[in-house]
Amino acid sequence: MSEFTVSRRQVLASAVAAGAVVATGSPAAAHDTAEPFPLGVASGDPTAHSVILWTRLARDLYAPGGLSRRTVEVGWEVATDERFRRVVRRGTTLARPELAHSVHVDAGGLEPGREYFYRFKALGEVSPVGRTRTAPEPWADPRSLRFAIANCQDFQNGYWPAYDALSNEDLDLVVHLGDYIYEYDPSSRFPDRRHVAPETPGLDQLRTLSDYRNRHAQYKTDPALRAAHAAFPWVVTWDDHETENNYAALVDELDSGAAHQTAAQFAKQRAAAYQAYYEHMPIRANLRPGSPDLRIFRRFDFGRLLRLNMLDTRQYRTDQPGTADFGPVEAGLGNTSGTLTGRDQERWLTSGLIGSPARWNVVAQQVMMSRTLLPNPALVPPTMANLDQWDGYAPQRERLLGVLADHRVANPVVLAGDIHSTWFSELHRDFDRLDVPPVAVEFVSTSISSDFPAAFDAPVKAANPLLNPHVKYFDGLKRGYLRCTVDRHGWRTDVRTVDSIETRRSPVRTQASYAVAAGTSRIVAA
Ligand code: FE
Ligand code: CA
């Protein structure tokens, strides 16, 4: 305890600054911390009576051994007020070196649909305070639900004023759809946004457990991200970059070259990536260190208003058809044995949709489901599709949309990220038969900071009315997040974008608003 001489109590208002308290004041320059909670606090996976509370102790962000190899006792408290006068739950848990001194408390015995505050105590110090919220009882009829959708936060491509804005929203929940970290080597226009180098520079990717841990820790040095975690419970899933660009199950990105690995080699990398992800996320999962598998597809009910199915379309998918990201749409149409979810997850999803009591049934996942034809710069064939998306797995998409239609699943809403641009689409069983009513809607959120080349924006905007008339809104120019407000009668999505990611602070505005009336699967300007 004597090694921590300064005692701090932090309330939510100062949580932004709290985690950045380092010896020299600059997280990028020096990463020895004077206090044991430099990565902040987070909560997630809310049910009606419990929520996961997360933190990770560290003295040196990029050397977990800095806390020595000992196990540390961590106390936790949940209160109904920010000053912890009314503590309703408390306990102790252990932060173990084999899990990088991360802590996941499944705090139970809470009341449904209410706000709580939480904090940790360890090594004589008190953590920043987090705010969270439980879900309503499964049979309840909450009046409304309000949440944000975020994804794709390439640290090196710019700052995160989007998270600054998101923290100031009034939300029940944040849903993160992946690309929480990027695996690439240091390279940034911004001196304080350069990735910490992995153990083997030159591969342009992470590979070892300490590589992935350091990258996650670096991302959480950003005060805007820590504030967003401290402000709301999150439900997270991963996409490819938490492990490696465009991987599919145990098939890595490249078919050849220095970075290529066999399935057995890649399994070790995936185990490291999945473990570090778990260690840094407020997620309810059963991690076995060293295992290349981690089940994170799971389901949340917010009363009878909304069912949230969180998918994992990376761990179980078959390899993308073709050799490049983009290819002829026929390659996806012919991928009859292809799957994005694997058979077990598809069965789990289908039964959760068919048997759902919910008014709105959300399929939250990584890659765009809408058919998306893009003009081919090579002209032959005239169009191409992104085969890493559902277009590469068209038969499974048709199967899923068929289930939604045949079983009259109530108000299906697909959410996606990955493509660093905003796309709102009506989903048809047959995208060539727009005279038949759509069976679902899809909202694809732009990136928090990852790049969408500005030069692509105008050609896509010009091509959409012709090639993709089911797309009701597209924009590639702005970074931000989506804010969704849902009640029994309708769903509203606001496109919340920042002016610039060149600076830490930038104004946020509502760039567009669209709505879906219950029972229609039609997207209209709101
Ligand atoms: Fe991305
Ligand atoms: Ca991605």
Image (cartoon, helix red, strand yellow):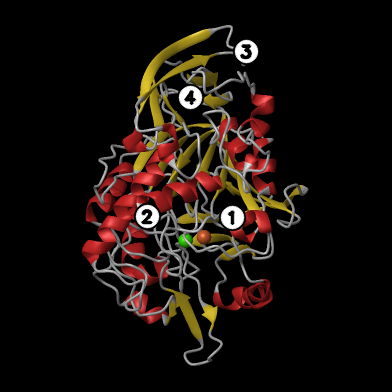
Looking at the rendered image, the disc whose residue lies closer to the viewer, 1 or 4, is: 1
- The residue tagged 3 is 83
Indicate which disc, 3 or 4, sits on the residue closer to the N terminus. 3
Q: Where is residue 125 in the image (x, y as percent from the top left)?
A: 54, 20
Work out how far the residue at label 4 is from the one at label 2, CA to CA, in angstroms.
Answer: 32 Å
Q: Which of marks 4 and 2 is in front?
A: 4
Q: Residues within 10 Å of mark 2 (few under 14, many from 20)?
A: some
- Kindly state the secondary structure of the residue where label 2 is placed: helix
The amino acid marked with disc number 4 is: Thr
Badge 3 amino acid:
Arg
Other-residue count near label 4 (Cα within 10 Å), few / some / many at <14 / 14–19 / ≥20: many
- In the rendered view, would you say 269 is above or below 116? below
Q: Name the residue under label 2.
A: 405
Please tell me whether mark 1 or mark 3 is closer to you in this view: 1
Distance, label 3 to label 2, CA atoms, is 50 Å
Q: What is the secondary structure assignment of the residue under circle 1?
A: helix
> For the residues carrying marks 1 and 2, which lies nearer the camera in this image?
1
Q: Answer whether labels 1 and 3 touch (C-beta < 8 Å).
A: no
Q: Where does residue 192 sit, x and y in percent of width and height?
A: 66, 54
Judge whether residue 368 can be spotted in this image. Answer: no
Which of the numbered marks, if any, corresponds to residue 134? Answer: 4
Which residue position is annotated with label 1?
155
Nearer the observer: mark 3 or 4; the answer is 3
Of 17 and 317, the residue lying toward us: 17
